[in-house]
Image (spheres, rainbow, N blue to C red):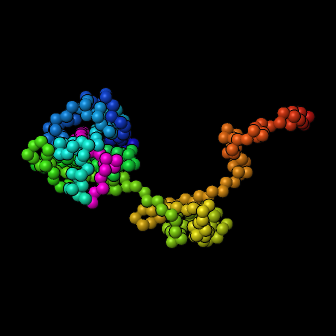
Amino acid sequence: MSVLTSPRGKVEVVHCRRTESQDISCIKNLIRKFTQKLFGRLNIIYLLEKANLAVTLYNDKEEIMAQATFLDYPNWNVAKQDDWVSVFRELDSEIPCTPLNTLFMHLFVAVDEYSIGCCKEMIRTVFKAVPELHFIFLIVPSYMSLGSTLITVFDQVGNIPSLTYDEDFAVHICHRHSHYPQLHIRKARVEDHDDLMPIFMQHDTILRSTYGEYFLAELIEAQDEENHAVVCEVEGVAVGFMSVCSRVNMQLLHECFDLGPFHGLCIPHPDDVLGRPQELSIQRSQGGRNI
């Protein structure tokens, strides 16, 4: 759920879901002449059947606010569907695009008043839904501008010729790190102590009073084959911490949780006593009645 605000100050709460066949008529109503110039004349039913991912934004009244469709090959005939990687690598060798980390936008429509907000929310949702996705490409005729909406999320990389027409097409790209960056997880270092301590002190002061002022640095420094510590890093600053150990305190787990359905987290053995002995149960029940 997200809140979008139009330039006139109107507010809409939008939700995201996968596109359904019942959305087709609403999608067609959102298509403008500008949409057809960017993406061409499309068969919406066929497009949705072939789509790798199709996403719809709708408001609290179940009204469709925007829709986008993504496939794993270019939206114009600028390369073979099964051999486009080499073409795009020649365009910019520093973009490590592959069929596994790249999608192409084949359609985007939105309610005009909320189009920019819908576009940004759509892109963020797609990157969130597909962790392996790092690049979204958009191919448009070179004489066309992206308009005021798509230009907010796409940057032009270059031009490539069409395979069937004497015409060039502009290649635009959208990077994950600009909209929904992946967290960087690494092994903890003693130097992370100063970044992490404010987080600990914000939630718990008992550890510090119990184990001393530098307990966290000592925990990080004591890493070995059985004890590991990792941090989540954003722009060079540690913002999260996790410490794991291969040793398990079984007695404490049994005291705190009912592990019966999981066989006490132990490997089953024919001699295991799975229930309380019957005689002991009878004695305890009789003793309870005498009291």
Q: Which residues make up the magenta segment?
A: 94-115
- Residue 21 is situated, as x and y percent measured from the top left of the image, at 31, 28
Q: Is residue 106 magenta?
A: yes
Q: Is residue 290 left or right of residue 80?
A: right
Task: Say whether residue 277 is left or right of residue 132.
Answer: right
Residue 112 image-quadrant placement: top left
Identified at 84% across, 33% down, the residue is: 278
- Vertical order, 120 against 195 (above or below): above
In the rendered structure, the answer to whether residue 50 lies left or right of residue 286 reads left
Q: Check the picture and name the quadrant holding the C terminus.
A: top right
Q: Quadrant of the N terminus?
A: top left
Taking the view exactly as shown, the residue that stands out farthest to the right is 290
Of residues 214 and 130, the one drawn nearer to the viewer in this rendering:
130
Location of residue 15 in the rendering, given as x and y in whole percent from the top left corner:
37, 39
Farthest left residue? 166
**Does residue 175 appear in the picture of this structure?**
yes
For this rendering, which residue is in front, 260 or 19?
260
Was residue 126 drawn as part of the magenta stretch in this picture? no
Image location of residue 5, percent across then percent down: 30, 46
Residue 233: percent from the left, percent from the top? 45, 62
Residue drawn at x 17%, y 45% as measured from the top left: 78
In the rendered picture of this protein, how many numbered marks are placed on residues? 0
Residue at the (16%, 38%) spot, across then down: 40
